[in-house]
Amino acid sequence: MDKPRMVGILDVTDASLTHKTYTLDVEVDARPGQFCMLWIPRVNEKPMSISNTKGKVQVTVKKIGDFTERLFELGRGDKIGFRGPYGKGFEYVAGDVLLVGGGCGIAPLRPLKDVLKGHVVVSARTVDQLLFEKEFADAGFNVHVATDDGSKGFKGFAHQLVEELLKEHEFKCVFCCGPEPMMRAVLDVCTQANVSSQMSLERYMKCGIGICGSCTISGLRVCREGPVFKGETLLGTEFGHYTKDASGVRRKHNGC
Ligand SMILES: Cc1cc2nc3c(=O)[nH]c(=O)nc-3n(C[C@H](O)[C@H](O)[C@H](O)COP(=O)(O)OP(=O)(O)OC[C@H]3O[C@@H](n4cnc5c(N)ncnc54)[C@H](O)[C@@H]3O)c2cc1C
Ligand code: FES
């Protein structure tokens, strides 16, 4: 297994009220959708999507538990362990595409703004948690906002807005990342509309390189065969229905 190398944090910016983007002093040959493992000594090691694949690596993080709380205490000049890039990224598609990001799920989709064209749905629970709207608009994307509480844009869930957009436009492919029940709902909408899709999954990871088996979904290793899967591969699996916790116990997902 690769050993983490200690890299410096070059910069930390507020990406939203609840998210920070870290610029790390490391450059890797990564494809949008790939992830890295970040290690804080004596705390833990966690997977993070690479939210900038050109030049210095960036990750965009939401403070949610032990690891991310500690990461939020680090700043410019501090060092963090890095290994990667890992996993299989998105496959590029010619023509207009639809990107759909829920909360922090927009992070792995962000680098696609430089290689694809079309529309993007940026969704979050509230307006405070929306990410990268301006960056996508500046890159020429048609930006659609959805918030659960209606504090900005469409009031409702991302898949409901996707259903409307699929009626109005022809997309070659839908690229999606967010909470798993949300992605499952988007997959079902795409399947019904006969539009192909690619979904970037999050599962509990330990090794990140296909050895430990903690990240499997119906036999597929998310860290190796994913995290990006074609929608058709996920049909008929436990995707969106069951997940596994840190101890490997299978649990039912809550609704969208
Ligand atoms: C391929 C991949 C890419 C990822 N990319 C990112 C990224 O770009 N940015 C980012 O912030 N995180 C990302 N994550 C999630 C990240 O690795 C951590 O799991 C997460 O930040 C929580 O770690 P923690 O130790 O702070 O919280 P924990 O102590 O592990 O969790 C605290 C609580 O939050 C819950 N929880 C944990 N993760 C999530 C989640 N994703 N959504 C909702 N509830 C959750 C736990 O069940 C627990 O109740 C990614 C995960 C994977 C597998
Ligand atoms: S995290 Fe170990 S097999 Fe995927």
Image (tube, helix red, strand yellow):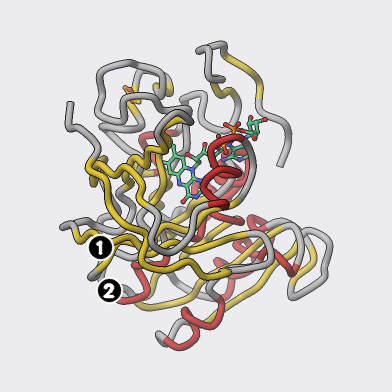
Residue 147 against residue 249 in the figure, above or below: below
Residue at 38% across, 39% down: 232
Q: How many labels does the image show?
A: 2
Amino acid beneath label 1:
Tyr
Residue 68 against residue 203 in the figure, above or below: below
Say left or right for 193 vs 127: left
Observer-side mark, 2 or 1, equals 2
Q: Position of residue 39 (x, y in %)?
A: 37, 38
Q: Where is residue 154 in the image (x, y as percent from the top left)?
A: 75, 71
Residue at 17% across, 32% down: 2
Residue 8, by quadrant, is bottom left
Q: Which sits in the foreground, 139 or 5?
A: 5
First reached walking from the N terminus: tag 2 or tag 1: 1
Tag 2, which secondary structure?
A: loop
Asked if the residues shown at circle 2 and circle 1 are in contact, with their CB atoms under 8 angstroms apart, the answer is: yes
Ligand 2 found in image quarter: top left
| Residue farthest front in this picture | 77
Residue 86, by quadrant, is top left
Tag 1, which secondary structure?
A: loop
* Disc 2 Cβ-to-ligand 1 distance below 8 Å: no
Residue 249 against residue 210 in the figure, above or below: above
Q: Report the quarter where the N terminus lies.
A: top left
Would you call the spot at circle 1 few (<14 residues within 10 Å), some (14-19), or many (20 or more)?
few
Q: Report the quarter where the C terminus lies.
A: top right
Q: Which mark is residue 92?
A: 1
